[in-house]
Amino acid sequence: MDKATKSKLSIGLFVLGFAMIFVQDLKRLDTINLGFTWPFAIMFYLGLIFMAAGYWLKQS
């Protein structure tokens, strides 16, 4: 994988992971209706995995 593709994939995975963690954290606010009922525990751990993969790709 070339460096530009790896960098884009790294940033994309990191941002996607951060968004998943942020969205599952919004469920605590009663005023925000997200409109869907995802299993938030799975979203949290997938977000952590995506962030770790993005960080790992950036470092390697």
Image (cartoon, rainbow, N blue to C red):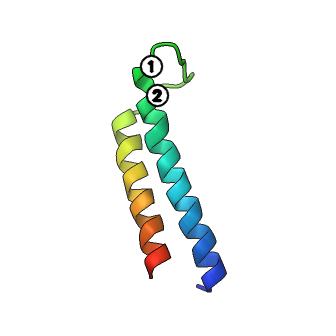
Residue nearer the viewer, 5 or 36: 5
Which residue is farthest right?
A: 4
Percent coordinates x, y for residue 29 in the rendering? 44, 19
Q: Is residue 31 above or below residue 4?
A: above
**Is the C terminus in the top left, top right, bottom left or bottom right quadrant?**
bottom left
Percent coordinates x, y for residue 13 in the rendering? 53, 60
Q: Are marks 1 and 2 in contact (CB under 8 Å)?
A: yes
Instruction: Specify the amino acid type for callout 2.
Output: Leu
Residue under label 2, please give it: 26
Q: Is residue 46 above or below residue 12?
A: above
Percent coordinates x, y for residue 45 in the rendering? 35, 48
> Is residue 46 rendered to the left or right of residue 36?
left
Tag 2: Cα neighbours inside 10 Å, few (<14), some, or many (≥20)? Answer: few
Identity of the residue drawn at 64% across and 77% down = 5
Q: Which label is found at residue 29?
A: 1
Residue nearer the viewer, 43 or 58: 58
Label 2: which secondary element: helix
Q: In this view, does 26 lie above or below 33?
A: below
Instruction: Specify the amino acid type for callout 1.
Output: Leu
Which residue is farthest bottom?
A: 2
**Is the N terminus in the top left, top right, bottom left or bottom right quadrant?**
bottom right
Label 1: which secondary element: loop
> Which of the 4 image quadrants contains residue 2?
bottom right
